[in-house]
Amino acid sequence: METVNTQGIPYYSKIKPMPFNKGMAGEAQSNPLHICTRPRAQILLEL
């Protein structure tokens, strides 16, 4: 929730301590937006 309405960055990551101080749990993610910059290169498939 702390990244809502902020400037986007390539990767987001967070770490938090595990129960009983057994280490750190981490997670990272990236959410790219794929945009076709060559629309004439697309192939239309008809079913």
Image (spheres, rainbow, N blue to C red):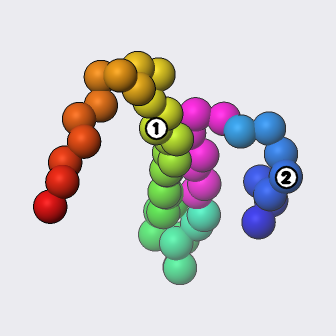
Placement of 4 over or under 41, stated as above or below: below
In the image, which is nearer the foreground, mark 2 or mark 1? 1
Placement of 45 over or under 4, stated as above or below: above
Label 2 – label 1 distance at C-alpha: 20 Å
Secondary structure under badge 1? Answer: loop
The front one of 46 and 39 is: 46
For image coordinates 58% across by 49% down, the residue present is: 13
Placement of 35 over or under 41, stated as above or below: below
Q: Which disc is residue 45 wearing?
A: none
Query: Residue at label 1?
Result: 34
Query: Residue at label 2?
Result: 5
The front one of 16 and 47 is: 47
User: x and y percent of residue 42 in the render?
Assistant: 30, 31
User: x and y percent of residue 35 in the render?
Assistant: 49, 33
Placement of the C terminus among the 4 image quadrants: bottom left
Secondary structure under badge 2? Answer: loop
First in sequence: mark 2 vs mark 1:
2
Which residue extends farthest front? 46
Q: Which amino acid does label 1 sit on?
A: His
Q: Label 2: how many residues lie within 10 Å, few (<14), some (14-19) or many (20+)?
A: few
Q: Which amino acid does label 2 sit on?
A: Asn
User: x and y percent of residue 22 in the render?
Assistant: 46, 69
Q: Give the range drawn in magenta.
A: 9-15
For image coordinates 77% across by 54% down, the residue present is: 3
